[in-house]
Amino acid sequence: MSRIFIALTPKPEFNKVICELKEDQKKFLIRNHKVNWSKDNQHHITINFIGVMEPEQKEEMFENLENRPVFKNLPVEIDSLSYFPNENGQVLVANIAVTPRLQKLFDEVEKVVARIGFGMTLRTFRPHITLARFKDKNRPFSQIIELEEPVNSVIEALDVYESSFKSGKTLHTLAQTFSFE
């Protein structure tokens, strides 16, 4: 059964910059450390990971997302790279600055999800784009690149994905898109 998550998907030109950040970071990979890099075509900023849903719940969620208040295109900014969820984490991410508009979108999505029976999260919203995962507790990079300036873009839609695990690989399939204005 697939799991559902709601996310923001980078436009192609923003995705290209994310891919370039990964290439720059690969230069600092310590020899013999294994890192699983995110697929270039699967970058996203998760707004809400819901999990397994019944088809009726999914349809109700789609209807509620369609009828949400109008939302304008959303500026986003990568302000740094770091380990996630903390310095001991085993994920390398591009951190997204939490702006008031991004927080508002997160809050609105939380309300929609709660309305269909998926409780509100207790975690702090820490938007990011996963760049790589690794199993070894040792740091696989000699350093993490520092951005000379933030990377800015605009997101034009809220996307719902189905995530499935097949042959040892995680696959994300776009289920529905809700365009901003």
Image (spheres, helix red, strand yellow):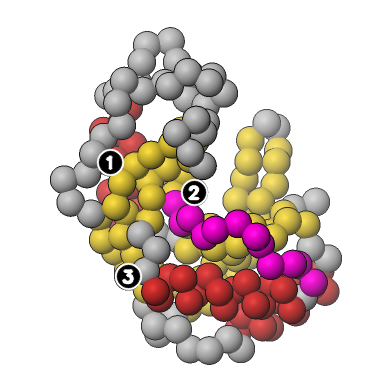
Q: Secondary structure at mark 2?
A: loop
Which circle's residue, 2 or 1, is located before the other in the chain?
Answer: 1
Residue type pointed to by label 3: Pro
Q: Is residue 114 left or right of residue 123?
A: right
| Residue range (magenta) | 117-128
Q: Is residue 54 magenta?
A: no
Label 1: which residue?
20
Q: CA distance from mark 2 to mark 3?
A: 20 Å
Q: To which quarter of the image does residue 59 belong?
A: bottom right
Type of the residue with mark 1: Glu
Quarter location, residue 6: bottom right
Give the residue pinned by disc 3: 75
**Three-letter residue code for mark 2:** Gln
Is there CB contact under 8 Å for labels 3 and 1? no
Disc 3 element: strand
Q: Are marks 2 and 1 in contact (CB under 8 Å)?
A: no
51, 115: nearer the viewer: 115
Instruction: Estimate how packed mark 3 is, as few (under 14), some (14 to 19) or many (20 or more) residues with alpha carbons within 10 Å.
Output: few
Residue 21, compared with residue 143, is above or below; it is below
Cα–Cα gap, marks 3 and 1: 20 Å
- Name the residue: 36% across, 15% down: 30
- In the image shown, does 116 or 10 lie closer to the viewer? 116
Give the spatial CA distance, label 2 vs label 1: 14 Å
Magenta region's main secondary structure?
loop
Q: Which mark is residue 42?
A: 2
Q: Residue at x 47, y 18 (%)?
A: 138
